[in-house]
Image (cartoon, coloured by chain):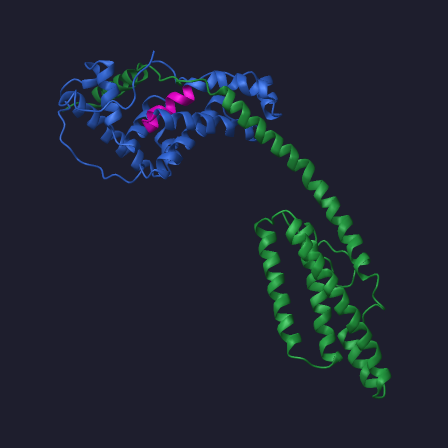
Amino acid sequence: MEPSLFRHEVDPAVIDALRRGDLAAFERVYRLFERPVYALACRLLGDRDAAHEVLQDAMLKAYERAAQYRGEAPFWAWLRQLATNEALMRLRRARRFGAEPLEIEPADEDAPPAWMLADRSALERALAALPPATRTVLWLYHVEGLTHVEIAAHCERTVSYSKSQLARGTRRLRELLTDHPEASPCLIAPTA
Amino acid sequence: MPDRTDRMNAHAALADALRALPAPTPERDLWPLLAARARRRTQRRRYALFAVPAALAAALVLALVLPAALRAPRPAIRPSTAAVAGATAAARPGAAAYAAPVAELSALRERSQRLERWVHTLDVGGAPLGGRALAGATELEDMIGLVDVQLAAGGDARTQLPLWRQRVDLLEQLATLRLGGYAVADAGAATPTVWIN
């Protein structure tokens, strides 16, 4: 299993310099985390322009609040938290993070998981077709490895909400990949 | 019915599939823009670190100097309303009893006019006020308006004396606020009572 893109160790001297407002240290941090922050924002928001804004705002917050980083967690985890919060804030502002009812849909769970058979572009399309809240929970849980408790805290919801969104997202992905592999819009064009 | 192991495998397979997706990369290098924003914010922060103490010092000096400068032509330290009332009651009625209040009244009027002109000059040529300062200035102007209404009702020197004192005090506060910093205490000593952004 590939680790999260965020998992980069940062030299403590660079963090110290960042705390002092050193611009060169800031550039080093930016270069290291530019791609993970942007990728996370893209996945959560499904919008490249908004992801660019999140990248800038999250990085600027990291620069301004570096003095508040106490080193209790890895720096990358702290930065990922800033980026996730920034992206979720945008979803909330755009009212795209509403309380979506959990639909109980029948699914053929005996069949092999569709994502094991689907190609990457089909999975991209299916992911992009999910509601933002569902996609967010799915991504944070499976890719970033956050627990339901952590996701609930990020989303300002309950643990049950996180669990139900995960179940819903998994089921919906299976449906999209099984029944309508070509029907979903491609919001995020993959780049090499 | 799939068992727990099957479900866990399915979840792990989904996690693998999602992680294997190519990570989107920014379409352009945002660093130059970000660096410029960071520089601007740093400059603003440094400016604030310098400007706030400087403004504080300037306001303190102003608060110390302004009352003395404005009160210089006054004939005497003004007595309190109670002292005026007591002195008037103790003295026999006549021209001498009213001489002091009338003289002070005249000085207060003159001072009020001078302050008003100065405040007007500050209003025209000064920097725009921030939110809190603007609210404070509006409140002071309203209070001056109320005093003016009472003064317009007429009355003798003893009735009008406290009103003119109040008007002068309010104008002093308004002038100080326009310059930013502290309100000037009533008795002439500068007291840092109100901090304005």
Q: Nearer the viewer, residue A66 or B178?
A: B178
B85 relative position to A38: left or right: right
Q: Quadrant of residue A18?
A: top right
Q: Residue at x 33, y 26 (%)?
A: A47
Split into 4 quadrants, where in the image is the N terminus of chain B?
Answer: top left
Magenta residues? A36-47
Q: Nearer the viewer, residue A37 or B76?
A: B76
> Where in the figure is residue A52, as x and y percent of width and height?
41, 25
Residue A36 lies, with reference to residue A83, above or below; the image says: above
Residue A25 visible in the displayed image: yes
Residue B37 lies, with reference to residue B99, above or below; the image says: above
Q: Colour of chain A?
A: blue
Residue B183 visible in the displayed image: no
Q: Residue at x 32, y 16 (%)?
A: B19
Q: Which chain is green?
A: B
Q: Residue at x 26, y 32 (%)?
A: A131
- Let me know if residue B48 is in the magenta part: no
